[in-house]
Amino acid sequence: MSTMPVHKYKPFQPIHLPDRRWPSRVIESAPRWCSVDLRDGNQALVEPMGLERKLRMWHELLRMGFKEIEVGFPSASQPDFDFVRWIIDQGLIPDDVTIQVLTQARAELIERTFEAIRGARRAIVHLYNSTSTLQRRVVFGLDRAGIAEIAVRGARLVKELAARMPETEVVLEYSPESFTGTELDFAKEICEAVMDVWEPTPSRKIILNLPATVEMSTPNIYADQIEWMHRNLKQRDSIVLSVHPHNDRGTAVAAAELAVMAGADRVEGTLFGNGERTGNVDVVTLALNLLSQGVDPELEIHDVQSIKETVEHCNRLPVHPRHPYVGELVYTAFSGSHQDAIKKGFKALREGGSPLWEVPYLPIDPQDVGRSYEAVIRVNSQSGKGGVAYVLEHDHGYTLPRGLAIEVSQAVQRRAERTEGEVQKAEILAIFEREYVNRAGPLRVTRHRRVGQGADERHEFQVQIRGVAQVLSAAGGSPVEALASALSRHAGIAIAVDEHAAHALPRSAGDETAAYVAISVGRKRSFGAGTHGDADMASLAAVASAWNRARPADAAQLAAAAD
């Protein structure tokens, strides 16, 4: 048993909803999105955004396709007020975009808020007051009726001021702040009291926003709360039911998804989850989760790196390397078994011709969000043959046979273990080419030709053995087998070709061929690789490389035979 002070905390009570329906539902379309980066996100920053950063964030949100954007809390600070006025006065709000402004249910703050939006074509005025049992007792010292009166008073003033501004279409939104800590019957009561003032209709809906101002329970309980409200609020056809999850328990994304399954129509959140404490729900993750299920997220996220750079500049906060879909390392595999599965997945995808994305360990195609395959596999001491083979094939065009891939990976792993770090792709190439490709040593094949025809055909090889020119020859078969035979006879050692493969080298501008062989020299097995503009010469260079890599005694015996 630990010594943690568990006696200070009590479990959140579940909701009595035995016929809950959300567990059997799936999300088939995107919710309405509302970005709150410029308000909720901004107020959580150590260094709140100035005009330049706010405008950059504003234009990024527009480019991504957000149609509702909370642009500030204009009654809370002069910079927020000035920004709202700037985008209105400068004509920076597209006709299909609605700005949103937040205000507490206090008369002077509501009036200042309406001053800020004057002249806007359309604006959401978001009214809130806190309703939780804890805040009623500790902060306000009021009972339910007193808290409800605050909301109703504020709602009346909002309605009155909206009527005085006919040039602006004012959409009304109300949040019982700290909804998750509010009794459901009271949350319903206070929302309906506001509705009685605002008188929504199916053609002129209001937004009721049910925030997890503090995440207090598991996501399934939040879903139960949303479904209860969805099923019990009156005039549901006159309501846009919205959620605003925070991330105190680290489950805001799950809570938002389950809330949409439970009946929510709209989600307020931020890019990459910036916000108070542990943050808001991450709209990018939510949207790309939809993409991964074949659902149109209705946001343009084709270049996550550009979005990430903008958000890091505006917030002056880094995005974590493991952040879903966006982080530097999220499409990267270091594990050998993962690398092997990814390599095989790409191969199956190329050969299968299916339009569906099915690659192990990659839930979406990195290219769909502007990421390349360059960093999908990176190699360190945890990596295996799959990763090394993938790098050599994908980045450098070498398609290694399995046995050779294992051997090269072992050399790379030894390098990684010595340095206790990552082995860069250029180093992997250097290790392979230095050790295996056109490997220098006692034997070099300089020319090959066929002489005779049919049964009399022979292969003639001009070679250099320890720098001395020689001519070797052998009958029939492939050039590789003939060279092995000629070397066997010349050196008096049994040499056999166990494997032979070749392919065009895509990275080469000169139509080169890469060839690989495994030879047995006595009981010793040796791999070699060769490259050349002539396919036969590439294979013969591979045989020479394999011989030159054989144990020194064998190379010395061949050299002695030349003498």
Image (cartoon, grey):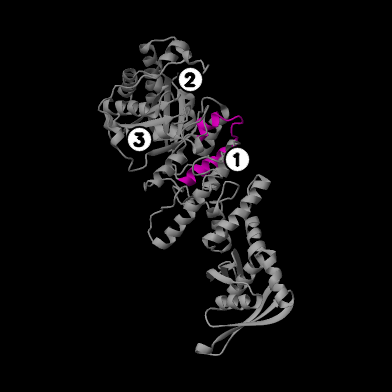
Q: Name the residue under label 2.
A: 108
Q: Position of residue 222 (x, y in %)?
A: 37, 27
Element carrying mark 3: helix
Residue 531 is left or right of residue 355, and the answer is right
Residue type, numbered disc 3: Val
Tell me which numbered mark, 3 or 2, is placed earlier along the sequence: 2
Residue placed most toward the observer, 189 or 324: 324
Is 503 located above or below residue 364 in the figure? below
- Whether the residues at callouts 3 and 2 have beta carbons within 8 Å, the answer is no
For the residues marked 2 and 1, what is the alpha-carbon distance in whole angstroms?
34 Å
Q: Name the residue under label 1.
A: 313
Q: Residues within 10 Å of mark 1 (few under 14, many from 20)?
A: some
Residue 219 picture quarter: top left
Q: How crowded is mark 2: few (under 14 residues within 10 Å), some or many (20 or more)?
A: few
For the residues marked 3 and 2, what is the alpha-carbon distance in whole angstroms?
35 Å
Q: Where is residue 479 in the image (x, y as percent from the top left)?
A: 56, 78
The residue range painted magenta reads 37-64
Q: Name the residue under label 3.
A: 260
Is 532 located above or below residue 260 in the figure? below
Q: Is residue 539 in sight in this rendering?
A: yes
Q: Nearer the viewer, mark 1 or mark 3?
A: 3
Element carrying mark 1: helix
